Image (cartoon, grey):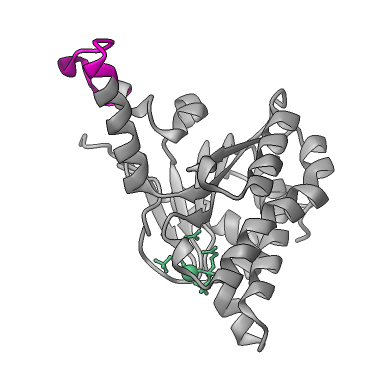
Amino acid sequence: MTENNIDGQINNLRVPDHIAIIMDGNGRWAKRSGQPRIAGHKEGMNNVKRIATTASHLGVKVLSLYAFSTENWKRPSTEVSFLMKLPVDFFGVFMPDLIKENIKVVITGFKDDLPAKTQNVVNKAMEDTKDNTGMVLNFAFNYGGRAEIINATKILAEKAVAGEIKPQDIDEKAFSDELFTSVLGKYADPDLLIRTSGEERISNFLLWQMAYTEMVFDDAYWPDFTSDNLINDIRTFNDRDRRFGTV
Ligand code: IPE
Ligand code: IPE
Ligand code: MG
């Protein structure tokens, strides 16, 4: 199967509206072939384009990609600098493809804490694609689930102190509206989470939003994760019985 010839693979495939991916294993991918970790991040970046294209062709509504966590600042500064520069390279190279695919770029996370150059480039990517009507490509960049929840709590507390809302009016909808993912509207909660590289944990991703998300852990390192992997993981999802607390 090639990246653009998925038609034969998708018979009877029920494609989830919102797929979230924890793109993990770049460092180990590089190490395996004796390369520096950043070589893995570069190849991982190229894979974002491939998988986003496949997801778009499959009819996914929102693809959320965990690209940098609030905890990833603890990595060596050379690696952090490289990761901060990746959006510049990514949008520099792939923007024409994203436009051609009618993909709309969204960034969720603490954008104001990013280096100015990174902020400029992600803001421009959002601006350049804001009228696109196809798949939403949501990069969680400088994102952390706990920090997001605390941020929403502060906003609601400030509104209550200012008399704009009453504490008893705070419900799940009011809370969700203050999360970064509110820009995703009715697709804010992922249907399927995929984590690559064999690790089986959440690592602070979309804690609130994943209350009823189905999780699939795929052994492939992110740079090796192909359209076949994606389709297989969707098939696994299709075999699940989502009950949402009912019988
Ligand atoms: C995921 O790959 C990318 C980011 C977290 C930015 P890693 O860099 O975590 O790769 P491993 O887990 O060390 O192999
Ligand atoms: C999660 O991966 C963050 C991203 C993929 C951006 P990590 O590699 O940072 O997670 P841990 O440290 O193994 O939990
Ligand atoms: Mg990792």
Q: Depth check: give the residue in front, 124 or 9.
A: 124
Residue farthest to the left? 168
Q: What percent of the width, then of the height, locates residue 166?
A: 19, 13
Can residue 180 be seen at all in this image of the molecule? yes
Above/below status of 167 relative to 201: above
As rendered, which of 67 and 246 lies closer to the eye?
67
Q: Does the magenta stretch include residue 165?
A: yes
Q: In this view, does 27 lie above or below 124?
A: below
Quadrant into which the N terminus falls: bottom right
Residue visible at 35% across and 28% down?
176
**Is 174 on the left or on the right of 138, as rendered?**
left
Residue 15 located within the stretch drawn in magenta: no
For image coordinates 26% across by 14% down, the residue present is 162
Corner quadrant of residue 125: top right
Q: Residue at x 45, y 51 (%)?
A: 193
Q: In this view, does 97 lie to the left or right of 218?
A: right
In the picture, measured across the screen, residue 152 lies left or right of residue 73, that is left
Quadrant the C terminus occupies: top left
Start-end of magenta stretch: 159-173
Q: How many marks?
A: 0
Q: Is residue 225 visible?
A: no
The spot of residue 164 in percent (x, y) is: 28, 10
Task: Report the front residue among 32 and 245.
Answer: 32
Instruction: Name the image quarter holding residue 96.
Output: top right
In-image side of 166 versus 30 (left or right): left
Picture coordinates of residue 184, whole percent (x, y) = 51, 30
Q: Which residue is drawn at 80% across and 49% down?
A: 92
Residue 113: image location, x then y, percent: 51, 46
Q: Is residue 183 above or below residue 56?
A: above
Furthest residue in direction bottom, as rendered: 34
